[in-house]
Each structure stands twice: as C-alpha cells, then as structure tokens.
Image: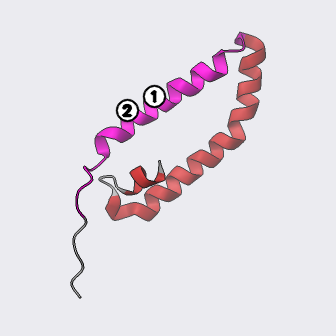
Amino acid sequence: WMALVTRGEWAGVRGTVLGIVTAVQGAGTVIGPPIGTLVWHDYGHYTPFMLCAIVLTICSAIAIPCLKPIGKEPENPG
C-alpha cells in the first residue's frame, strides 16, 4: 500500500501524502475498535467486517485512478 501511495500522481508531495495516510491509519486504529464493538453488539457479528470492506472499497476507488503506471526509472548518469 505504501509503495503504491508513493508512486501516485502526487509523488511531488510525497511527504505530505505519507503524513496524511499515516495519520488516517492511526485514527482508524484508535476509532475502529470501539465502533466495531458497538456495531458488533447492535447489528450483528458480520456488520463490522462489511463496514470495513465498504471503507476499503471506497478508498481503493479513490486511490487507483491516481496511480501512475510503473515503468522504468530514469537512469542516473555517473
């Protein structure tokens, strides 16, 4: 995932993009377990997994069009 993120159209602002991705992943780590527990008890055992799949699908649909085709890296003279 991180390799794909660093190869995207946004490679010129790679540090900013990696910071945002890392911050959102950290927020998901903190927010996910309590929300998952509530959803598990209120809506059934499969609902947290379905919500996770929906979020991953949305994120993939946003990220994939922005990826650059991977080609040869320019050679460094010297």
At which x and y percent is residue 75?
22, 74
Q: Which quadrant is home to the C terminus? A: bottom left
| Residue bearing the label numbered 1 | 57
Q: CA distance from mark 2 to mark 1?
A: 6 Å
| Residue bearing the label numbered 2 | 61
**For the residue marked with disc 1, what is the amino acid?**
Thr
User: Which secondary structure type mostly characterizes the magenta part of the structure?
Assistant: helix
At which x and y percent is residue 50?
58, 19
Q: How many marks?
A: 2
Q: Quadrant of residue 6?
A: bottom left
Report whether 65 appears left or right of 20: left
| CA neighbours of label 1 inside 10 A, class few (<14), some (14 to 19), many (20+) | few
**For the residue marked with disc 2, what is the amino acid?**
Ala
Residues 72 and 20: in front is 72
Report whether 38 appears left or right of 16: right
Tell me: residue 44, above or below residue 76.
above
Q: Residue at x 25, y 49 (%)?
A: 69
Q: Residue at x 37, y 62 (%)?
A: 13
Q: Is 46 part of what is drawn in magenta?
A: yes
Which type of secondary structure does the marked residue at label 1 adopt?
helix
Report whether 11 appears left or right of 24: left
Numbered range of the magenta stretch? 43-72
